[in-house]
Image (tube, helix red, strand yellow):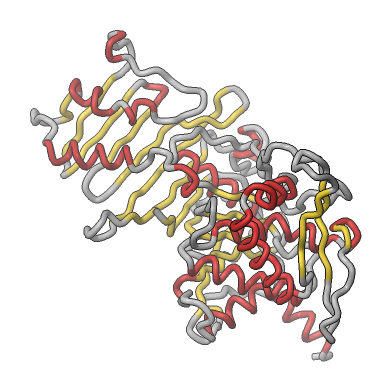
């Protein structure tokens, strides 16, 4: 299931409803403090809800604070919005059946100091479900007719309990609840066809393992260390687990290591970062310390010495967590993430390496993954546009979306831009790249 549209309203710096077109490869651009990170946080929150998990607006790498800091503040007499809303539209293909859109719509209100789900709905052209937890009500319907389930005060045999971790326990228990549904404005029983549509609508949201995983990176990754002690692989947004992951693959999965090593070295050579990478064991057992080392080759082919990751500049260590996760997600990868939310992947990288990242993102998006990339790098963007123009991958112009975040007075507007077959940007507003044009005019003394 791929999300192709997302909207927010009264959320952070977005007062009016802003709708963004998402694509296999979506680039988020604009000045600092225009809501790009907040947008990524909502992408993950809606994904968590879609997979049945309660969203956490303080979970790394996005710490948005309390409800008062998440809901839009109009200032003056406008005050703070009493709630905020968001939703997305995803497309799923059912075997040979034509694909259909699934709409997820949510409303958040304060519960104590934190944002909490006040209302959530799943909608298709054939059926819909809406839950309002505060009123103890589950509504559903289709073909212009509706039914209602009141689940408060139910007998213990049909009781549906809340969960601190999962949303929609009542949605998952729909088949029990719908037997007591009350028709709204008619006397019809729930049709079997509608029951099947609703059941699929609910079950499509159940967590489906690694393939549903979102990889969300922090804008600054963890610092390298000279020596690592083996430890369990506990994922985090900064990528501090990646050295342990690489060592685990090196010691336990030789074939996977050779494949991953080739991919890392191929990119390292294209980007000018390194020509070889290795895990250097400091003992005879995998439980003993190890180091990560890289080396460069001279133009003549002479191989330089291996150097510790901490001794070769910050760029390699900043890129390594992203590269490792990306290559694991390529076709036939061992543990693929479906969606990537990346913040400033170009940090500490030379322009040639930034451009190489653009090509890598095109390759990953063309393989069926979805990437949302917040970037300030013209080199990365230009490479993506040229690779699409030159058909370096199967990525088409319509498979790329550029979201331009433009600041107004007290809020932000999102512009969904496209590229054409020549890589030109279409639909840009007057303010897009105004700074660069002014700098160029100044340089040319115009």
Quadrant of res 363: bottom right
Residue 405 visible to the viewer: no
Q: Position of residue 368 (x, y in %)?
A: 46, 63
Q: Position of residue 65 (x, y in %)?
A: 67, 35
Q: Residue at x 64, y 67 (%)?
A: 263
Q: Position of residue 89 (x, y in %)?
A: 39, 53
Residue 67 visible to the viewer: yes
Would residue 10 be found to the left or right of residue 283 on screen?
A: left
Please determine whether, in this image, residue 15 is positioned above or below residue 434.
above
Q: Residue at x 55, y 71 (%)?
A: 362
Q: Position of residue 432 (x, y in %)?
A: 64, 73
Q: Is 327 in front, or is 347?
A: 327
Q: Is 359 in front, or is 113?
A: 359
Q: Looking at the figure, which quarter contains the C terminus?
A: bottom right
Q: Residue at x 76, y 80 (%)?
A: 438
Would residue 357 be found to the left or right of residue 90 on screen?
A: right
């Amino acid at each position: 299931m791929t999300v192709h549209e997302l909207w927010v309203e009264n959320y952070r710096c977005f007062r009016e409803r802003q709708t963004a077109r998402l694509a296999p490869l979506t680039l988020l651009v604009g000045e600092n403090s225009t809501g790009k990170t907040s947008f990524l946080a909502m992408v993950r929150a809606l994904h968590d809800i879609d997979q049945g998990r309660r969203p956490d607006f303080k979970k790394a790498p996005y710490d948005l604070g309390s409800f008062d800091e998440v809901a839009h503040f109009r200032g003056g007499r406008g005050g703070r919005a009493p709630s905020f809303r968001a939703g997305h539209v995803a497309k799923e293909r059912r075997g040979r059946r034509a694909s259909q859109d699934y709409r997820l719509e949510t409303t958040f209100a304060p519960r104590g100091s934190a944002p909490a789900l006040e209302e959530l709905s799943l909608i298709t052209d054939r059926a819909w479900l809406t839950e309002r937890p505060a009123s103890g009500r589950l509504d559903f319907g289709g073909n212009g007719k509706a039914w209602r389930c009141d689940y408060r005060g139910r007998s213990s045999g049909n009781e549906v309990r809340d969960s601190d971790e999962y949303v929609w326990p009542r949605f998952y228990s729909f088949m029990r609840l719908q037997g007591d549904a009350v028709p709204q404005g008619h006397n019809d029983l729930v049709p079997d066809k509608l029951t099947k549509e609703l059941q699929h609508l609910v079950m499509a949201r159940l967590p489906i393992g690694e393939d549903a995983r979102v990889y969300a990176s922090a804008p600054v990754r963890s610092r390298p260390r000279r020596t690592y002690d083996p430890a369990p692989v506990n994922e985090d947004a900064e990528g501090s687990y990646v050295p342990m992951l690489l060592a685990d693959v090196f010691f336990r999965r030789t074939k996977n290591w050779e494949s991953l090593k080739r991919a890392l070295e191929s990119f390292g050579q294209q980007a000018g970062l390194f020509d070889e990478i290795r895990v250097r064991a400091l003992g005879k057992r995998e439980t003993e310390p190890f180091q990560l080392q890289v080396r460069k080759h001279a133009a003549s082919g002479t191989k330089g010495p291996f150097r510790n990751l901490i001794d070769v500049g910050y760029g390699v260590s900043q890129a390594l967590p992203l590269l490792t996760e990306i290559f694991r997600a390529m076709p036939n990868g061992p543990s693929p993430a479906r969606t990537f939310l990346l913040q400033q992947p170009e940090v500490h990288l030379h322009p040639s390496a930034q451009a190489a990242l653009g090509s890598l993102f095109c390759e990953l998006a063309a393989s069926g993954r979805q990437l949302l990339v917040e970037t300030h790098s013209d080199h990365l963007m230009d490479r993506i546009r040229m690779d699409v123009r030159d058909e370096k991958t199967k990525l088409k112009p319509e498979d790329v979306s550029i979201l331009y975040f433009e600041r107004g007075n007290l809020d932000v507007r999102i512009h969904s831009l496209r590229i054409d077959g020549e890589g030109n940007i279409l639909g840009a507003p007057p303010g897009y790249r105004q700074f660069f044009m002014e700098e160029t005019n100044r340089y040319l003394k115009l």
